[in-house]
Amino acid sequence: MKCEELLRSVLPSATLYPLYGNLSPEKQRLAIAPSKPGERKIVLATPIAETSLTIEGVRIVVDSGLCRKLVYDARTGLSHL
């Protein structure tokens, strides 16, 4: 994840957790578990997280506004992301 790499470089003391559907259940549990005392926790999630889960203790949410969307190209007759 490019975003994860960038955040690690500017916030080395923060703990980053990706969160997406194909992630192992254990890593998903780590991402949604409450933060440890004094921990700055950042969860990088797919849009599904907007509606399907609640993470206790969240103080700030940043939405990039970007989303991969299937688009049909009439010229080629193909769909692409």
Image (tube, rainbow, N blue to C red):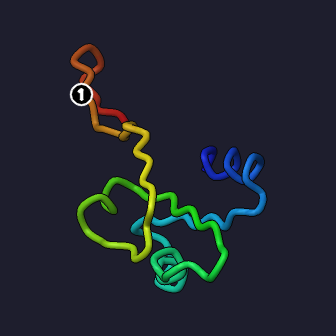
Answer above or below: position of 75 versus 28: above
Relative image position of residue 41 (x, y in whole percent): 59, 67
Relative image position of residue 76 (x, y in whole percent): 30, 19
Answer above or below: position of 11 versus 54: above
- 10 Å crowding of disc 1: few (<14), some (14-19), many (20+): few
Quadrant the C terminus occupies: top left
Residue drawn 37% across the image and 40% down it: 68
Considering depth in this image, is 68 or 49 the residue closer to the camera?
49
Q: Is residue 18 left or right of residue 15?
A: left
Residue annotated with mark 1: 72
Answer above or below: position of 28 versus 44: below
Residue drawn 63% across the image and 44% down it: 2
Considering depth in this image, is 41 or 19 the residue closer to the camera?
41
Relative image position of residue 40 (x, y in whole percent): 63, 66
Relative image position of residue 33 (x, y in whole percent): 48, 82
Query: Which quadrant would residue 36 be assigned to in this image?
Result: bottom right
Give the residue furthest to the top: 75
What residue type is disc 1 on? Tyr
| Count of numbered badges drawn on the protein | 1
Residue drawn 34% across the image and 53% down it: 47
Residue drawn 44% across the image and 47% down it: 62
